[in-house]
Image (cartoon, rainbow, N blue to C red):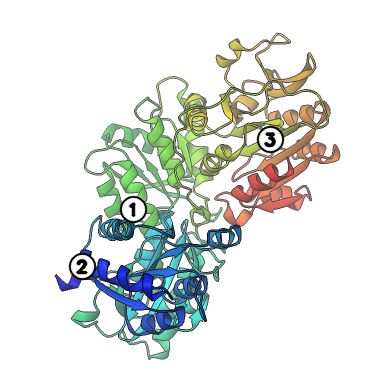
Amino acid sequence: MTSNKRKILLVDDEPGMLEPMAEYLSYELDQHEILTAYDGQKALDILALETIDLVVSDIKMPRVSGLQLLSKIQAKYPQTSVILMSAYGNHQIRDELKKNSFLHFISKPFSVSELKDLITEHFNKAESGFQGVLKNIQLNDIIQMCCLSITNMAIRVWKGSESGVIFIKNGDIIHATFGKTIGEEAFYQIVTWESGQFETLGDVIAPTVSINREWHFLLMEAARLCDEKALQQGGEEPAEASQDDDIIQSGTSAAQIVKLPKEKNIEAVPGTLSLQKRPRVLIVDDSAMMCKILTQLLTEDKTIKVVGTALNGQEALKKISTLQPDLITLDVNMPVMDGSTALKYIMIKSPCPVVIVSNVSDRSQVNIIDFLRLGAVDFIGKPKKNDISLQTQRLIDCVKNSSRACVNNYRRGKAAKPLQQKSAPPGKIKRTSSSVLVVINSGIGGYGELIKVVPMFSDTMNGAVIALQSMPAEFLVPFSRYLDERSVVRVLPLHRDQSKKNPSPGKFPAWKLNKGCCYMGTHDLVVQDGAIQMGPTNGSYYIGLKNNPKGRGFDHLLHSIADTFKGTVLVVLLSGAEVGALEGLRHIKEKNGTIISQKPDTCMIPDPLQKAKKAGLIAHEANPIDIVKRILKSL
């Protein structure tokens, strides 16, 4: 039972408050140890000598105030939780409290039984979930899993008298401490240990942000430092850890550290396929017949090599290490291990471009979207009997383009939850200079970015969004519905069947442009069914389909917008955006529109964006979240 005993430190400069509180809690919480301090400095002295689980502190105290104590605890003892109490609830104190993170704030006077319940609830919550010991696991594996899970976590690592803490926020490594060292240097000192012990501290707020690099870079750099350390030691393998120190094992190989596949067909940027090499494809589907069909279709292109097939996710994971594919086609629903579990393992252990090949059904459509959010590069439907030559070409193009994806550039976002209710659109966009139109162009590798971006738009903005995504026509309505359920703006598919509900100013399908709406279209719609264009109608605007020379759809759309829309036009280019001949982008710029690009080093397919940048058309570059923040700020 002593192993579960917690230490609670009570800090207050009023003996008449401190002593009765300590006496009551010692009796009611007899399973824990209660310590006391009459001021903040004494509390710091105790913290330096004891491992304290929880500090309950007054704010107004001499020498070291409660807020100063909180700041020092966050910096030096992040595993220690803090409850603050005060009789002074003025605005200045409350404003100061907002800048910090702590467990709870109690206004004096209060019932000590209330404090007891709060402490009990905190410790019960801390002990919930699974507990156990992971032996012979690498620390970098734990860090990778936390980053890929987009979690908030602090990890304390120690060996003997040395210890450090790594802070992860929303999947980013933002801070590390090792003794008096902070930042990247502290991170590298921790991760390059050969052995040690660790514990996760939960969602502990970092006292500052001292690291601004991507976690992929940090782990690769740590791997390089490990390699250098091994060479300096004469190339000897690290000594086997003792039984007490085998909680984590840090290897000395860069490939082991980050668990990346061996180099194959790699040029300057990791994760990019050389255009001169044949992409090696592993097909994963529980139907042997479908594996055979996909193999036949893909190998019609002599530049593609199918290196193997697997009937479930578990079989695929075994083959990945030996076959070293450049791309994996993955089915959604499979026995033994389904596609979702397999994809997570692939992205953690052997990052590789993955294309989802599945039929769109009520059962599969949400799963497909989740796969794309998790990092799958693209989606294409399974081949059907009709028009097999067109489907073959689409499959080949999808695989060849997706095999060039820089999957390590992708940052997975948290899944947005469906909204309980949403308001009706505020009405049509009037033809005035104050209105705003945002055009988002996304392609291969851009699904995940759209899933993050669209729910961020506000339904109160004086404008609308047109979003184009490369996707199969049958996926347009389910994908639009998914985004609509999770966005305050209305997301409406630019689909011929949907246009019947809208008045048409001409003899072709059209949609009236309303404020607070996002109109979702596909590049197939732009190029093959005609062209999406904009026009004026009854004092507002419409967007509609009209026959247009094949292959110039995106340029034609931008031309019609630049010539028709009187307000502010913002064009956003995301990963894999099909930019056409750049004529439309040039016309937007000539008409004082603004073109914003996703940063190439955050794109899975950066080539088209770099083409627009080289032509001098890009006004700003940012990651997708910052792009939307920039747009909303300008409204």
Which residue is at 47% across, 35% downward?
A: 395
The quadrant where residue 520 appears: top right
Kindly state the secondary structure of the residue where label 1 is placed: helix
Please tell me which of labels 2 and 1 falls first in the chain: 2
Q: Looking at the picture, which amino acid does disc 1 mark?
A: Tyr
* Most foreground residue, 244 or 284: 244
Given residues 206 and 8, the one toward you in this image is 8
Residue 439 is tagged as: 3
Alpha carbon separation for disc pair 1 and 3: 35 Å
Disc 3 residue type (three-letter): Val
First-in-chain label (3 vs 2): 2
Q: Label 2 vs label 1: CA separation?
A: 49 Å
> Is residue 69 visible from the viewing direction of this image?
yes
| Closer to the camera in the image, 159 or 41 | 41
Quarter of the figure with the C terminus: top right
* Residue 156 in sight: no
Residue that label 1 marks: 345
**Residue type pointed to by label 2:** Tyr
Q: Position of residue 195 (x, y in %)?
A: 30, 79
- Residue count near mark 2 (Cα–Cα under 10 Å), binned few <14, some 14–19, many ≥20: few
Question: Is 523 or 542 nearer to us in this picture?
Answer: 542
User: What is the crowding at mark 3: few (fewer than 14 residues within 10 Å), some, or many (at least 20)?
Assistant: many
Q: Position of residue 103 (x, y in %)?
A: 41, 60
* Residue occupying the point 24% across, 82% down: 241
Query: Where residue 262 sits: x, y (%)?
Result: 40, 64
Secondary element at tag 3: strand
Q: Which residue corresponds to mark 2?
A: 27
Image position, residue 506 (x, y; %): 73, 10
**Marks 3 and 2, Cα distance to the nearest angstrom?**
65 Å
Tell how many labels.
3
Q: Say left or right for 233 vs 487.
A: left
- The residue drawn where x is 34% and y is 37% is 332
